[in-house]
Amino acid sequence: AEGLTFEPRHMMWYRIGENGSAVQFRADQEVFSATVDGQLYVSLRPLGLYWTDRRGSYPPGFTQLPAVPAEVTVESSILEGPVDAALAQLAAEGSEAAAAALAARDGFKTLPRGFEHLWYVTRANVWSDGTSDGKPGIAASTSDDASIVKMALDIPLDEETLFEFSWRYDTLPALGPETEAQFHDYLSIALEFDNGQDLTWFWSKELAVGSHFECPLPGWGGKEYHWTLQSGEEGLGEWFSHQRPVLADFRSAIGGAEPKRIVGIWFIANSLFGRQLAAASFADAVVINGEERTIIFDSD
């Protein structure tokens, strides 16, 4: 699809019941537990399309889009007894799917307290609690996935609002300038505003420090904007600290009507285009508003 090769977990979602919530599979073979009775619905969602509600409704005009050939086989079964024991038994009997599902369960990552996957994007197994150095924070490692995780905030935004954070980038995944859609692989930290826009700061493979641009991906133009804080490969594997004047950066990178509040912090990872390793850690994130300090990561 669109020049990329996808596995089922990149595009497959399920819902239980007519009005249940849409949930993305995190692995090609996965076990889940139903919380309600109802019909099991399964759907493939093409790249660049996002749900309009948590039920998993396609956006208006979806049926008029050009068809994309896809060959997918879905097999489902109901397990009895404890999940791990049931999978182990099936794997011992020769089930490759059960063995893969059991291995996937062992590899699922846990998000830091207060974070969740951005519900209309993906639920990919990319982000994990804690940094590569053991500091309170969040870390990503992936070579073939995309993910955004979010913590909801409600902070007034004014001239004095500052955003502090530290990051350690280990690898940069982009194969070209991130301003172009086919090279838009990156890791970043972002703030979401009450006007529906977000500003994301990142380390670029080759863009000039201080450059900023509108997201080139379909569906994100006019919504997400990128700001290059570091560039090149010198310093990879080391920690760097940054402090940003949020409203001033908004004016420079986005402009127009100014938001009044910060409503979320995002961490973004994408490596679907070039399929290169993307790995980084983020820590020490604090939003400062005068005497008020909102600390993102718990230290306990």
Image (spheres, rainbow, N blue to C red):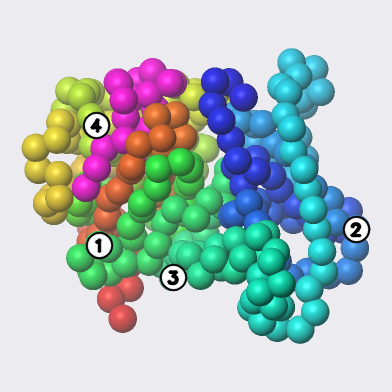
| Residue at numbered disc 4 | 204
Q: Callout 2: 10 Å neighbours few (<14), some, many (20+)?
A: few
Bounds of the magenta segment: 170-187
Quarter of the view holding residue 11: top right
Observer-nearest of 95 and 149: 95
Residue type at numbered disc 2: Gln
Residue type at numbered disc 1: Ser
| Residue at numbered disc 2 | 39
What number is the disc on residue 132?
1
Q: Callout 1: 10 Å neighbours few (<14), some, many (20+)?
A: some
Compute the Cα span from label 1 to label 4: 20 Å
Quadrant location of the C terminus in the rendered image: bottom left
Observer-nearest of 90 and 231: 90
Magenta stretch: includes residue 183? yes
Mark before the other along the chain sequence, 3 or 2? 2
Residue type at numbered disc 3: Arg
Residue positioned 74% across, 15% down in the render: 66
Residue positioned 71% across, 48% down in the render: 13
In the rendered view, tell whether residue 219 sits above or below residue 290: above
